[in-house]
Amino acid sequence: MKHEEIVRENLANKQLRENLSKAMHTLQTNRAKMVESKFVNWEELREQSKYAKNKALNSLEERLLEFEANATKNGFIVHWANDGDEACEIIYNIMLEKKANKILKGKSMASEEIGLNHYLEKRGITAMETDLGEVIIQLIHEAPVHIVVPAIHKNRYEIGEIFHDKLGVEKESEPEKLNAIAREYLRGEFKELSIGLGGVNFALSKEGAIWMIENEGNGRMCTTISDVLISVCGIEKVLETVEDAVSVDSMLTPSATGQFIANYNNIISGPRREGELDGPKECHIVLFDNRRTDMLRHEDYHEVLRCIRCGTCMNFCPVYDKIGGHSYQATYPGPIGDVIDPQIFGMDEHGDVVTLCSLCNRCSAVCPVKIPLADMIRKLRRDKVGDGDNPPFGTQNLSKNIAEKMVFKAVTTAFTNGWIFRNGVKAARMFNTPIHMVSGFVPVVNKWTKYKNLSNFGIDVYKEVSNMQGVRYE
């Protein structure tokens, strides 16, 4: 479906907008209260986290090789994948070797990115979600609407309806009863668990261990009681030391949900040792690139690899909370998705998402590791229309709108030439009638007039602009 169509559809869905607005404002409030009440050095911690991520990214090859060496010493079996298909194939081959036809998953956006569920399903293997939000959307065959809270677009009454329809239980709406239904549904699956899959928040190169954060305990079940554990990890998740990971972790959970600390912090340092009573007997970790190396090399976009997948940029985005994550039709919605989806999957496949942004800069302001997301989105728009020197892959396949390019070139000229700008705004009212006559045919303007009335320029626009708050002419 075209982005314009799905956006229009979701904007007309009052229940969706109400659910999203309530949820996003709750997350914003929780974060603000937590930062105010529990932290005296929030900005200092942001700088420390940014430094820890930059340090690892600036020595990424060394960190990854160090992680591989130490993880192997600890008993991990380390696999490398260039892209999503290779990562899926590795997991599939492990399952074939173990003669398994089902895998239970903890929450993992990395597995969403590589399309693991779909890949295994096509080969007759079931990938079953165990995170409550993921369970809900898997039952109705939807993709996550948010990278931290995947079913936040559904309220408790809608979830009760889903459980009633898909699991054959009585309709419930109380959170405790809904949780009990999900627990009962999943317990039987956990009893037969042989292969579990988990995500990775941090890969610790000095320790050769992985750190996984979660709130429900399902991740610990998947990684502890299975005979075989498979962890999926993008290469940018590696950090050098435990201290670095602690700095970043101190930003992650408060930013994501407004909690001081997550309910479960799992640090996995390898398979079960002799004499230990639990833990997997075999641990695999799949490290995959999927164009992260290209991003790291790019002077305009390398900073996006600092992302810790907290979802804060979505929680504060005035576009996301109106249209929801499904409007992006990509793995990662919201501002972070605007930046990384076109670069992972191609500008020709996902370039449209860069328009789902008002450039208000709130995402950049709240990002705990200070990624300049709004600036990157602006640059991707530049690349998309063919004005960038080093555009992401797939841009060459886009057809350029010549009229649109001419309009933007004219606007650029007008806004960067003082004489033209000053005289243009003084004479703007003379163009009211012609603009209204041709507005339906002018790119960009025609999309505006499709939903909004086009105002008239005043008698002295220059004076009106000069009097606006925050405007200063030099």
Image (cartoon, helix red, strand yellow):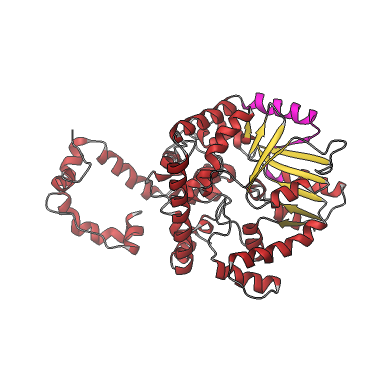
Answer with the quarter of the image where residue 431 lies.
bottom left
Q: Residue at x 79, y 31 (%)?
A: 74
Residue 155 in view (yes/no)? yes
Q: Residue furthest front?
A: 37
Q: Position of residue 198 (x, y in %)?
A: 71, 46
Q: Is residue 62 a member of the stretch shown in magenta?
A: yes
User: Residue 347: x, y in percent?
Assistant: 53, 45
Left or right: where 53 falls relative to 76: left
- The one nearer the camera, 83 or 386, is 83
- The part of the chain drawn in magenta is 60-86
- For the stretch drawn in magenta, the main secondary structure is helix
Q: Is residue 263 left or right of residue 470?
A: right
**The C terminus - image quarter:** top left
- In the rendering, at what x and y percent does residue 439 appear? 29, 59
Q: Is residue 13 visible?
A: no
**Which residue is drawn at the image coordinates 31% and 61% (left, top)?**
449
Residue nearest the viewer, comparing 2 with 274 = 274
- Total marks drawn? 0
| Residue at 58 percent of width and 70 percent of height | 173
In the picture, measured across the screen, residue 345 lies left or right of residue 34, that is: right
Residue 217 as seen in the image, left or right of residue 343: right
